[in-house]
Amino acid sequence: MADRLVSIQRRFLWGAGEDKHKIAWVKWDDVCLPKNKGGLGIMDITKFNLALLAKWKWNLFYHNGELWARILDSKYGGWRGLDAATIDNNASLWWADLKLALHNPQHEMVLKGGLTWKVGNGAKIKFWEDDWSFGDTPLLAKYPSLYLISDQQHNYIQEMGQQTDKGWEWKFKWRRHLFDRELEMADCFRNDVAGSCIQIHKKDEWIWKTEPTGQYSVRSAYNMLNGVDVEEDNGWVFEELWKIRVPTKITTFAWRLLKERLQTKANLRR
């Protein structure tokens, strides 16, 4: 459906019809960029849909006590179930499509870059597998050999220690005694997690880094998916172009001129 709608948009933009085709002079990804980045500011339907779908995961995390979220949690595993790459054959078409969308490589990259954990009591964060302590690097990726011999591989942070009078105390369990070559690595590992502040009376939270409020925003997610950080050599020209009070047809002509996409012999030959 999205491809069909984009096809209609493209034909309208370049003046094509059902029975005729015209040259698309500018890449659709560039057309969908904001005007101050050299595009026309047309909404990319596919990316906007991905940004909307991601809010399901956010809402499942923050509204897990509500009835609808409890049903999805009991049936599919809730927001954690969306992380699993495999799809249950008994899952509904809606849930299967939602998982496929969220596992889109581009979407995964944006979510990974946009979300960060704020550690509370550690009840929702997997100690080894979630990237809670080192930005985009889970502990299992930084210390793979220690992960392999850990007896707590799938434990949550809350299960990795206990609160004492002196504060949080880690209690690590290993499948065997550490070899000499692993002792130094284990010391680095303990030093890394020693500075982590576990607040037993607070809940774990997600923070959306691109919004001052820390709350997920479809707009900011769409901007990330659309690559608004793209820098144009003459980006200021495009920004000033759309401020000029002339008919849109003239502004669009000037936009194509700046992009070197007019229907000239040189461009047609190229």
Image (tube, grey):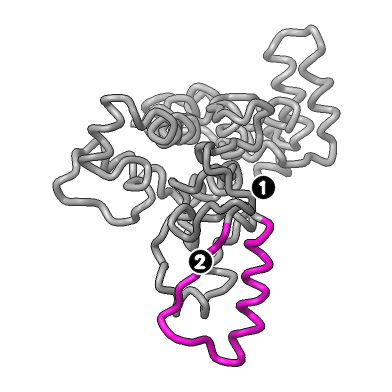
Residue 135 image point, x, y percent:
64, 54
Q: CA distance from mark 2 to mark 1?
A: 70 Å
Q: Which residues are magenta?
A: 169-195
Q: Is residue 172 magenta?
A: yes
> Compared to 14, does 72 lie above or below?
below
Q: Residue at x 63, y 69 (%)?
A: 190
Q: Residue at x 66, y 47 (%)?
A: 269
Kind of element beneath mark 2: loop
Residue 133 image point, x, y percent:
61, 56
- Identify the image quadrant of the N terminus: top left
Residue nearest the viewer, comparing 229 with 128: 128
Single out the mark in the foreground, 2 or 1: 2
> Compared to 134, does 8 lie above or below?
above
Residue 121 image point, x, y percent:
51, 44
Q: Residue at x 73, y 15 (%)?
A: 250
Mark 2 / mark 1, whichever is N-terminal: 2
Q: Is residue 143 magenta?
A: no
Residue nearest the viewer, comparing 199 with 263: 199
Residue 152 appears in which quarter of the rendering? bottom left
Residue nearest the viewer, comparing 23 with 178: 178
Q: Residues within 10 Å of mark 2 (few under 14, many from 20)?
A: few
> Is there a contact, CB below 8 Å, between mark 2 and mark 1?
no
Visible residue check, residue 117: no
Name the kind of residue labelled 1 in the image. Answer: Arg
Residue that badge 2 annotates:
171
Tell which residue pokes out farthest to the bottom in this image. Answer: 180
> Compared to 44, does 168 lie above or below?
below
Residue that badge 1 annotates:
269
